[in-house]
Amino acid sequence: MQKITACLWFENNDAEDAINFYSSIFKNSKIISETRWGKDGHGPEGTLLVADFELDGMRFQALNGGPHAAFNDAISLSIDCKDQEEVDLYWNGLTADGGKEVQCGWLKDRFGISWQVVPDILPRLLKDKDQAKADRVMQAMMKMVKIDIAALEAAARG
């Protein structure tokens, strides 16, 4: 059982839409529980208040908390990817329908959540014992928006 669960506070009653959006991208997803507003709640009766859900085995909570707090870049969700196909899958999925590409493998989805889409080769190359090789990889990565594994490997070779 996961001891700590991230709670994602949605401002505009977007929690249910967000869960459905993420579940369409992360195939191993499920809703664990939902609590909906009753007739005497602060939201429209029957709308989602809070839900627990999983994305690829990671548990989250989504809360329709109202306009008191907005997502910012201080926290991001990082996705470890095994190859370029997986990088492209998550990148294209999360930037769809209003998401925004940022820099160096970072993006912001249409709900304002920041994500890092990182191929597992990137940290390995950046930690290489050959510092000149690691520096070339870092320079190449700093020029990228979406991470390009072939370009990283080319930079590593010199």
Image (tube, grey):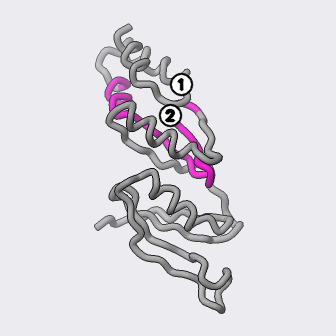
Query: Which residue lies at the image location 45% right of the left edge and 39% below the top edge?
Result: 117
Q: Are marks 1 and 2 in contact (CB under 8 Å)?
A: yes
Q: Check disc 2 and report the residue beneath it.
A: 105
Answer above or below: position of 52 versus 58.
below
- The answer to whether 123 is drawn above or below residue 98 in the figure is above
Find numbered disc 1 in the image and state the secondary structure of the residue it sits on: loop
Is residue 73 something that shows in the picture?
no
Q: Nearer the viewer, residue 38 or 61?
A: 38
Q: Residue at x 42, y 76 (%)?
A: 33
Q: Residue furthest right?
A: 67
**In the image, what residue type sits under mark 2?**
Gly
State which quarter of the image contains the N terminus: bottom left
Q: Pointer 2: residues within 10 angstroms few (<14), some, or many (20+)? A: many
Which quarter of the picture shows residue 156?
top left
Residue 24 appears at what percent x and percent y?
46, 55
Question: According to the image, label 1 marks what residue?
Answer: 144
Q: Nearer the viewer, residue 129 or 143?
A: 143
Q: Give the magenta part as a residue range.
A: 103-126
Outermost residue toward the top?
A: 158
Q: Is residue 113 left or right of residue 68?
A: left
Residue, x 64% and y 91% (percent of image)?
39
Circle 1: residue type? Met
Mark 2 lies on a secondary structure that is: loop
